[in-house]
């Protein structure tokens, strides 16, 4: 945990935005994998971590404005529990570490909430994403599960988003720790990869690096020779000469801050000519996006800049044609770049997505429905303290090629005859993590291979 003063300051800043009622915080429970005593790895709710720091299941908390009290609800473990878990901090000890003076057993929460509701007091809660917390809201507040997203407090949600979106110095240091471990994961993969190896062997190696650093994976590893599938978690393919290998993997620290990087490199010691050409197009777009990062600049505009640079490079290779500004405006570039340029990063690898992309990335503004841009998770103007990813890519998806070609879609912009030769190419993504300073975007973490020469030098020495 951070010092108690950190959590007290966060709660005080949150409290300053409300005058009456109750804020309800539900921590997460254990989630059984196939029976109660064999759960999935526990992961605390990130907003609960942010305001209370308690990283154990079975806790909840309230901030009661009318009575000017903050209460942590939890139960001390029994002797039967200790046999299996060992001695754990008491509820009072955990509360003290979070700067909370009052505690109560979990059974007291139900009575408190029902009394508050009977008094007609305002009850505010965040939209639940775990089934067990949806059931709790049904039991505590008598709100049907299907109505809970609509009845969650938008004011509470927005207050949390606008606090968490600006990372403190101590948070940035923790994220950078995660990024450094993530870089070690990627270096290990780049040294290990060779023809004849299974994707699963590389996934296992990078997982080992994350665990050995004292944390965990920030998300399931993407380790694949089929980089054209953006979230490919299948690991049974065998690496072959001529393949590109795409690794999208990140570490999470013991405090649960995440890193998220993508590397693409040849299974051979060097890129083929065609691989170099596409890789350089992606790298040029990546560098252009990094250069454009400034406070006040909307990330949506940086996304469009990257799309335009990708289109320029693809036109130079004979894969696109015509008026590129018009091509990007209409979405023709989404044949090659189907997703967004980046997303927020912090306690969640896609930070605060449980609270809604529309608030985190768009400040409540409507998202586009255009294929490609509708997958952009971050569009709002950048502010100092934002931490986010920059990850342009080019993906040759055979099914998309076939469908758009049959529909004769964007024939004025896409060179389908030339594109046919790239059906088996795969995909390339370059991803880095950035913190916005008062003047520019600073890349987080130690140096790692990024240029063609740097990647080939490391591959040749492996």
Image (cartoon, rainbow, N blue to C red):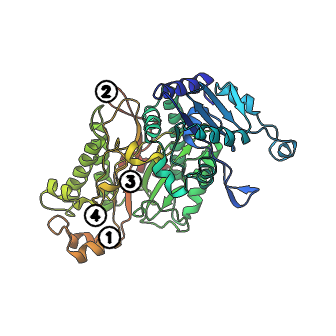
Separation of residues labelled 4 and 2 (CA atoms): 34 Å
Separation of residues labelled 4 and 1 (CA atoms): 7 Å
Res 300 → quadrant: top left
- Residue 56 seen anywhere in this rendered image of the structure: no
Separation of residues labelled 4 and 3 (CA atoms): 15 Å
Residue 93 vertical placement versus 349 (above, below): above
Contact (CB < 8 A) between labels 4 and 1?
Answer: yes
Pointer 4 or 1: first along the chain:
4
Residue 175 vertical placement versus 462 (above, below): above
**Mark drawn on residue 439:** 2
Provide residue 307's location: percent of width, then percent of height. Answer: 25, 52
Q: Residues within 10 Å of mark 2 (few under 14, many from 20)?
A: few
Pointer 3 or 2: first along the chain:
3
Dot 3 corresponds to which residue?
Answer: 429
**Mark drawn on residue 385:** none
User: Taking 88 as reference, is 3 left or right?
Assistant: left
Q: Residue at x 62, y 24 (%)?
A: 4
Q: What kind of element bears circle 1? A: helix
Pointer 1 or 2: first along the chain:
1
Q: Marks 3 and 2: which is nearer the front?
A: 2
* 341 or 185, nearer to the observer: 341
**Mark drawn on residue 400:** 1
The quarter of the image holding the N terminus is top right
């Amino acid at each position: 945990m951070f010092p108690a003063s950190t959590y007290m300051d966060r709660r005080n800043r949150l409290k300053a935005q409300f005058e009456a009622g109750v804020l309800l915080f539900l921590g997460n429970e254990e989630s059984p994998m196939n029976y109660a005593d064999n759960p999935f790895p526990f992961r605390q709710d990130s907003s609960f971590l942010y305001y209370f720091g308690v990283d154990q299941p079975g806790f909840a908390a309230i901030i009661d404005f009318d009575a000017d009290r903050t209460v942590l609800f939890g139960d001390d473990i029994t002797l039967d529990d200790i046999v299996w878990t060992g001695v754990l901090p008491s509820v009072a000890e955990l509360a003290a570490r979070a700067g909370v003076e009052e505690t109560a057993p979990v059974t007291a929460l139900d009575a408190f909430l029902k009394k508050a509701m009977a008094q007609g007091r305002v009850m505010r809660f965040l939209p639940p994403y775990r089934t067990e917390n949806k059931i709790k809201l049904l039991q505590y507040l008598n709100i049907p599960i299907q109505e809970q997203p609509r009845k969650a407090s938008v004011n509470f949600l927005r207050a949390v988003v606008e606090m968490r979106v600006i990372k403190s110095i101590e948070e940035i240091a923790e994220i950078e720790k995660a990024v450094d471990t993530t870089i070690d994961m990627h270096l290990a993969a780049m040294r290990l990869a060779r023809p004849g190896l299974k994707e699963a062997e590389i996934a296992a190696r990078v997982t080992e690096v994350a665990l050995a650093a004292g944390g965990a994976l920030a998300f399931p590893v993407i380790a694949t020779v089929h980089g054209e599938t953006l979230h490919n978690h299948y690991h049974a393919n065998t690496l072959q000469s001529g393949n590109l290998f795409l690794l999208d993997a990140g570490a999470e620290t013991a405090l649960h801050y995440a890193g998220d990087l993508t590397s693409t490199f040849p299974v051979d010691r060097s890129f083929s000519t065609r691989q170099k050409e596409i890789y350089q197009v992606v790298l040029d777009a990546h560098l252009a996006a990094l250069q454009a990062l400034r406070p006040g600049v909307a990330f949506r505009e940086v996304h469009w800049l990257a799309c335009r640079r990708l289109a320029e490079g693809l036109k130079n290779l004979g894969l696109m044609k015509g008026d590129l500004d018009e091509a990007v405006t209409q979405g023709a570039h989404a044949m090659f770049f189907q997703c967004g340029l980046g997303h927020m990063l912090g306690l969640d690898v896609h930070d605060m997505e449980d609270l809604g992309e529309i608030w985190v990335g768009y400040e409540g503004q409507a998202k586009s429905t255009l294929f490609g841009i509708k997958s952009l998770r971050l569009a709002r103007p950048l502010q100092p303290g934002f931490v986010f990813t920059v990850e342009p890519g080019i993906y040759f998806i055979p099914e998309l090629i076939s469908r758009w070609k049959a529909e004769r879609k964007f024939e004025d912009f896409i060179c389908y005859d030339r594109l046919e030769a790239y059906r088996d190419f795969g995909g390339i993504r370059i991803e880095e993590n950035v913190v916005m300073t008062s003047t520019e975007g600073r890349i987080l973490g130690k140096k790692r291979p990024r240029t063609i020469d740097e990647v080939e030098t490391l591959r040749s020495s492996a």
